Image (tube, rainbow, N blue to C red):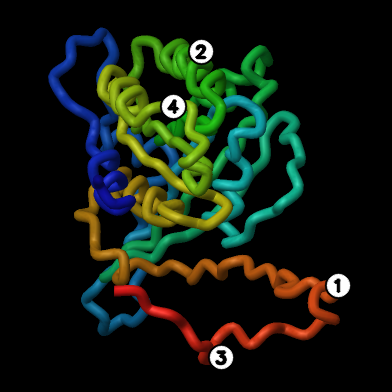
Amino acid sequence: MKSTGQIFESLQRKPSEGKNSSLTRFDMATARGDVAEPKTASADDNDLDDIHQMQFKVILLGDGAVGKTSIARRFSENQFNQMYKQTVGVDFFIRRINIPPNYHITLQLWDIGGQSIGSRMITNYISGAHAVLLCYDITNYESFANLEDWYGLVLKTFENKQLPYTALIGNKFDLRHLTAVRIEQHNQFAEENEMASYLMSAKSGDQVHQCFNKVACTLAKIPLKAENDISTSVVTATIIDHQRHDESVNDGVVPEYTKTRNVCILS
């Protein structure tokens, strides 16, 4: 059986090339120029290393309750809200990633509400995106099936234009024992549509920062550094202090389970 790490490694693949299409795949140099030309600023007049500043627009699309806001908040604020609150319209998050030796990359996250699929504004939200993350809940097959419609909006918005970097995101991987979408289905959708592929958990933080780091490096055309070279913060686990003994049992006294007892050994 493959380990979780091996599963992640097999899924985090680059989009394939060479598939016939009237649409040109993501062109990095052009897309980078859409938002801002890379800026250079010397921190010290005697410093030969320039700081390259880049900014990219990243869209999160998918049905409501799949965890788009949780993903954005986990990455930008390193927080997770246990209470669900529906996003109406669009919310914005921002995070800057520092990649050695001298890259400062700012990601603008556009969290599009799930009900916006029928909105007249949806194409305006998507327009100008450098990356589109199609998100679904691995425990909800319908949210996966509806990605065909969401991706259709992306194709419509970028008709006769260069497509942005696109990735398939399976969220709530901490509930993989309840999955309703097989990994084979996930892989097939990503491969057929030439998408990158990720599985993550916004709740635990597993693979969230790794995903956005790879997106940022891809958009900036930077060779991916080791994770310990990229500025990220530690995810703190939620610890619940459950009662360990029923006070109504044994007058509330915890038995000495480790006490040595006489046993009979049969041979």
| Residue type pointed to by label 4 | Val
Is 263 in front, or is 161?
263
Mark 4 or 1, nearer chain start: 4
Q: Which residue is mark 2?
A: 149
x, y percentage for residue 96?
A: 47, 60
- Of mark 4 and mark 2, the one earlier in the sequence is 2
At 37% from the left edge and 55% from the top edge, which residue is drawn? 210
Image coordinates for residue 175, horizontal then vertical, percent: 52, 43
- What residue is pinned by disc 3? 259
Front label number (3 vs 1): 3
The residue that appears at 43% across and 36% down in the rendered structure is: 169
- State which quadrant residue 1 falls in: top left
- Residue 24 visible in rendering: yes
Local crowd size for mark 1, using a 10 Å CA cut-off: few (<14), some (14–19), many (≥20): few
Q: Is residue 126 left or right of residue 232?
A: right
Check whether the beta carbons of the residues at disc 3 and disc 1 lie within 8 A of each other.
Answer: no
Q: Which residue is mark 1?
A: 248
- Which amino acid is tagged 2? Asp
Q: Name the residue carrying label 4.
A: 181
* 113, 141: nearer the viewer: 141
